[in-house]
Image (cartoon, rainbow, N blue to C red):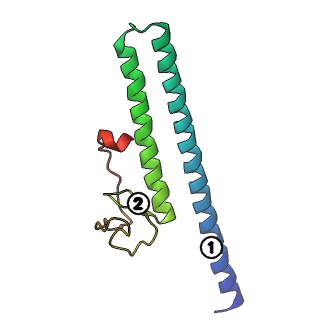
Amino acid sequence: MNILDKFNDVQRNVAERSKTAAEVSNLKRKILYEEERIVEIFADIGKKYYKNPNDDPEGFKLLCDDIDSRRRRIKRMKYEYNNIKGIKRCPKCNNEVTDRSQQFCGSCGSRLPEAKESDDFSSEFTDDDLD
């Protein structure tokens, strides 16, 4: 392998890391935006209720549905973030596991799901997923 091949390998590695850093930064920015927007919606609900507690419940439901959909987006983005960073989460205790080859949670001992490159994030959520 000559010096140019080594230089090209280093250049590719730097480009890949730069792309990953940009993706991580973009996800963090999007998550922060969604979290800030949720706080604003909660404030809107409080103001609306304070002004007229007997207001149309459908209006409150729409705002609550908006919060739920934003929480789902945040959960998806955090899943993407963890995949980029190589982090698995225990399905039982939600503990972070950074070693992809680890098969069991170091905290509770539960079996960890297999990490696959083609994992698709399920869009099905329970109410517990939104906390």
Q: Residue at x 42, y 48 (%)?
A: 76
Q: Nearer the viewer, residue 108 or 101?
A: 108
Q: Nearer the viewer, residue 8 or 55?
A: 55
Residue type, numbered disc 1: Arg
Residue position for label 2: 95
**Of the residues under marks 1 and 2, which one precedes in the sequence?**
1
Q: Position of residue 56 (x, y in %)?
A: 37, 9
- The vertical placement of 9 against 33, above or below, is below
Query: Which quadrant holds residue 64?
Result: top left
- Badge 2 local density, few (<14 within 10 Å), some, or many (20+)? some
- The vertical placement of 61 against 126, above or below, is above
Secondary element at tag 1: helix
Q: Residue at x 35, y 15 (%)?
A: 58
Q: Which mark is residue 12?
A: 1
Q: Residue at x 59, y 45 (%)?
A: 29
Q: Which mark is residue 24?
A: none
Nearer to us of marks 1 and 2 is 2
Q: Position of residue 90 (x, y in %)?
A: 35, 61
- Badge 1 local density, few (<14 within 10 Å), some, or many (20+)? few
Q: Residue at x 33, y 73 (%)?
A: 103
Total of numbered circles in the picture? 2
**Quadrant for the N terminus in the image:** bottom right
- The vertical placement of 61 against 55, above or below, is below
Q: Position of residue 28 (x, y in %)?
A: 57, 49
**Quadrant for the C terminus in the image:** top left
Secondary element at tag 2: loop
Q: Position of residue 112 (x, y in %)?
A: 32, 66
Residue type, numbered disc 2: Asn
Residue that protrudes farthest toward the front in the picture: 107
Q: CA distance from mark 1 to mark 2?
A: 33 Å
